[in-house]
Image (tube, rainbow, N blue to C red):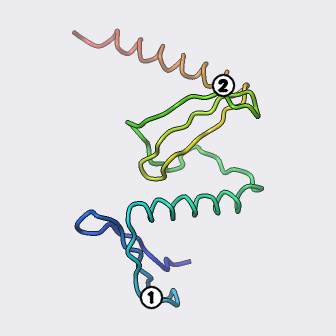
Amino acid sequence: MSARMQVIQKEDGSGATLRFLEGSGLEGEIDLTLGQLSQLIASLGRVRFALTNNQPQPPIGNAPFLPVYSTNWALQIDALTEGSTLAFQHPAFGPVGVVFPPGDVETLIKGLKQHRALMAANTSRKPS
């Protein structure tokens, strides 16, 4: 399936433009402010979630993703699962949250401890 639209940032950095491409059956473009673009992204995310909710999640290994290196985040108790929710501001997608059930919390803690141990071992090997 070929792309039927594209979104590009405005040259002045003030927003974005949604352009309908040849073969889309539509002509023209729509200018979007940052707020409108954020609403569109959130709406598309909710629809995608609903469409994929009953499908098995694809494997994450080697999947491309957009990492976030500096953001605001919060850790909260999830009342439904009694696990933990990690909520953060993703620059591309807005507020995002992932819930770790209690078993996954333990796996995550173990993995983080292993990462810290590896980093400490690598730091001690560096020449001064």
The amino acid pointed to by label 1 is Glu
Looking at the image, residue 19 sits to the left or right of residue 57; the answer is left
Question: In x, y percent, where is residue 94?
Answer: 48, 50
Crowding around mark 1 (Cα neighbors within 10 Å: few <14, some 14 to 19, many 20+) is few
Q: Which residue is identified by label 1?
A: 22
* Identity of the residue drawn at 42% across and 74% down: 6
Total numbered circles: 2
Front residue (pair 39, 123): 39
Classify 70 as above or below 40: above
Question: In x, y percent, where is residue 39?
Answer: 50, 61
Q: Quadrant of the N terminus?
A: bottom right
Q: Which residue is identified by label 2?
A: 105
Question: In x, y percent, where is residue 119?
Answer: 42, 17
Question: In x, y percent, where is residue 64?
Answer: 49, 50
Front residue (pair 76, 70): 76
Looking at the image, residue 102 sits to the left or right of residue 128; the answer is right
Crowding around mark 2 (Cα neighbors within 10 Å: few <14, some 14 to 19, many 20+) is some
Classify 123 as above or below 89: above
Looking at the image, residue 34 sits to the left or right of residue 116; the answer is left
The amino acid pointed to by label 2 is Val
Classify 55 as above or below 107: below
* Identity of the residue drawn at 26% across and 63% down: 13
The label number, if any, that marks residue 106 in the structure image: none
Q: Secondary structure at mark 2?
A: helix
Q: CA distance from mark 2 to mark 1?
A: 48 Å
User: Counting residues from the N terminus, which is met first, the one under dot 2 or under dot 1?
Assistant: 1
Contact check, label 2 and label 1, Cβ < 8 Å: no
Classify 29 as above or below 82: below
